[in-house]
Image (spheres, rainbow, N blue to C red):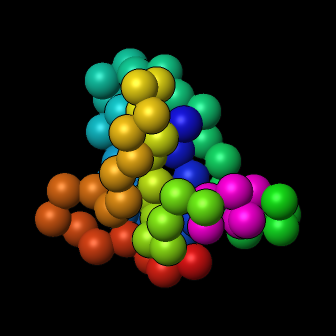
Amino acid sequence: MVYTIRGCSACVKLLKKWDEEGAAYEERRVELDQKTLDEARGYGSLVPIVVWPDGRVEQGFGDTIGCFI
């Protein structure tokens, strides 16, 4: 699962990479509703926020700083 926000360059880069690799993921856009934003903030304050199946959480993408939420 990945929390993103529209216009975030790190989010765009991550999703593009995953799409090119054919990776399956669930995208949750934090700007669309308060519940999703609150969920994301439970994991961190910088999107993209990736929540891996094993429970690990990563913020940002590579050398690109994400967007604060």
x, y percent for residue 8: 47, 70
Whether residue 17 is situated above or below residue 47 in the rendered picture: above
Regarding residue 51, the answer to whether it shows in the image is yes
> In the shown orientation, is residue 24 left or right of residue 57?
right
Is 37 magenta? The answer is yes
Q: Looking at this view, is 14 or 57 the one in front?
A: 57
> Which residue is at the far bottom?
68
Q: Residue drawn at (23%, 68%), measured in percent from left and top? A: 64
x, y percent for residue 17: 30, 39
Q: Looking at this view, is 44 or 17 the one in front?
A: 44
Task: Say which quadrant the C terminus sits in.
Answer: bottom right
Q: Residue drawn at (83%, 59%), measured in percent from left and top? A: 35
Q: Looking at this view, is 50 or 21 the one in front?
A: 50
Q: Residue drawn at (83%, 67%), measured in percent from left and top? A: 34
Q: Main secondary structure of the magenta part?
A: helix
Is 29 magenta? The answer is no
Q: Looking at this view, is 49 or 21 the one in front?
A: 49
> Which residue is at the far left?
63
Question: Residue 65 lies in what quarter of the image?
Answer: bottom left
Question: Residue 36 lies in what quarter of the image?
Answer: bottom right
Numbered range of the magenta stretch: 36-41
Question: Residue 54 lies in what quarter of the image?
Answer: top left
> In the shown orientation, is residue 39 left or right of residue 42?
right
Q: Residue drawn at (52%, 29%), measured in percent from left and top? A: 25
Regarding residue 8, the answer to whether it shows in the image is no
